[in-house]
């Protein structure tokens, strides 16, 4: 196991949902955090009893490429290193093969946030992750990145791509100690699933359980790497 103390983690979409649960848990475990959100105000005070020496709140908008670069620069200026990147920010919109209206714009929006921004952040942080010798990347993909449900296709396409990005990141960083995991949860109780009726909220995965898994995965030694982590609230493996 690695020693967490002083290791620096960047988390996108850290202001709410799964990202916030991960941030709170990693702070408690001794990590230093660089939190990314498109609203810096929404990050203020979200980590209870935190001290400024261990946290920086940064502007990150998946759709604003200059913010990706500036976030990395600000993180390195503050902490002089990056040990871990958590690509968590994501959106879901409805795009099905049997849609009557063309909704390519919705698909483009999901590609930008769920795939292109994680790739951009991975490229920008990779030199620092390699330098760490035990760099870690978690891509918050989805069970929708492992299986397709009905004719709904857009979100799944982007999450399959996020899993592909994870596998490529493993290859790209492996010889330098970088390890990447595609986290693939089913329904998680966050704002994203607030309108889901098929699974009661109490039966959904808790963001704090996912945060605990992330903490474990990123603290494993270089020789114990989890490529994909499938987490379900149903008996099926990927349904
Ligand atoms: N909830 C589930 O059932 C579930 C299951 C599997 C995978 N996931 C994945 O888990 C990740 C987190 O989702 P969640 O459930 O925590 O959803 P959430 O509560 O809706 O949070 C989404 C996060 O992404 C951020 N975000 C969205 N668009 C952004 C943009 N253009 N630039 C920067 N940040 C942006 C949001 O920021 P704002 O507050 O500014 O909107 C928010 O912090 C996503 O990748 C999602 O696809 C969720």
Image: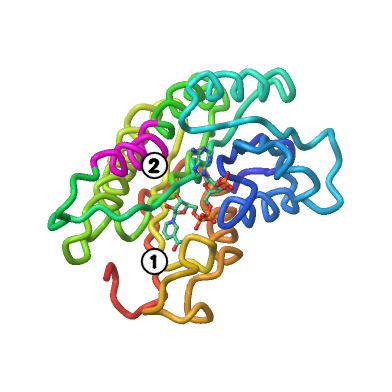
SS under mark 2: helix
* Image quadrant where residue 112 sits: top left
Is 167 rendered above or below residue 141?
above
Is 103 rendered above or below residue 210?
above
Q: Which residue is mark 2?
A: 114
| Near-viewer residue (227 or 93) | 93
- Residue 214: x, y in percent? 54, 54
Distance from label 1 to label 2 (Cα)? 16 Å
Q: Earlier in the sequence, mark 1 or mark 2?
A: 2
Is 57 rendered above or below residue 148?
above
Residue numbers of the magenta segment: 104-116
Residue 191 placement, left or right of 16: left
Mark 1 Cβ inside 8 Å of ligand 1 = yes
Q: How many marks?
A: 2
**Mark 2 crowd level (few <14, some 14–19, many ≥20, 10 Å Cα):** many
Residue at position x 37%, y 62% from top? 230
Q: Which residue is mark 1?
A: 186
- Residue 201: x, y in percent? 51, 77
| Near-viewer residue (207 or 95) | 95
Residue 166 placement, left or right of 95: right
Colouring mode (rainbow / by chain / secondary structure / one colour): rainbow
- Residue 91: x, y in percent? 43, 49
């Amino acid at each position: 196991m690695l020693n967490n103390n002083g290791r620096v983690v960047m988390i996108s979409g850290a202001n709410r949902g799964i990202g916030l649960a991960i941030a709170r848990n990693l702070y408690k475990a001794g990590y230093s955090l660089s939190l990314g959100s498109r609203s810096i105000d929404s990050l203020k005070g979200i980590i209870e009893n935190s001290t400024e020496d261990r946290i920086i709140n940064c502007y990150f908008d998946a759709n604003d490429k200059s913010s990706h670069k500036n976030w990395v620069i600000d993180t390195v200026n503050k902490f002089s290193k990056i040990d871990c990147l958590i690509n968590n920010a994501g959106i879901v919109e409805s795009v099905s093969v049997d849609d009557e209206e063309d909704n390519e714009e919705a698909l483009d929006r999901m590609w930008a946030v769920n795939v292109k921004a994680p790739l951009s952040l991975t490229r920008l942080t990779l030199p620092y992750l390699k330098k760490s010798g035990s760099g870690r990347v978690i891509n918050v993909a989805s069970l929708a990145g492992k299986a397709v449900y009905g004719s709904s296709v857009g979100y799944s396409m982007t999450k399959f791509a996020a899993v592909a990005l994870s596998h490529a990141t493993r290859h790209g960083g492996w010889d330098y100690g970088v390890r990447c995991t595609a986290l693939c949860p089913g329904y998680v109780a966050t704002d994203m699933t607030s309108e889901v009726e098929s699974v009661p909220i109490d039966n959904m995965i808790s963001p704090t359980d996912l945060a605990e898994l992330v903490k474990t995965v990123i603290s494993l030694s270089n020789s114990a790497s989890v490529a994909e982590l499938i987490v379900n609230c149903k008996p099926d493996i990927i349904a």
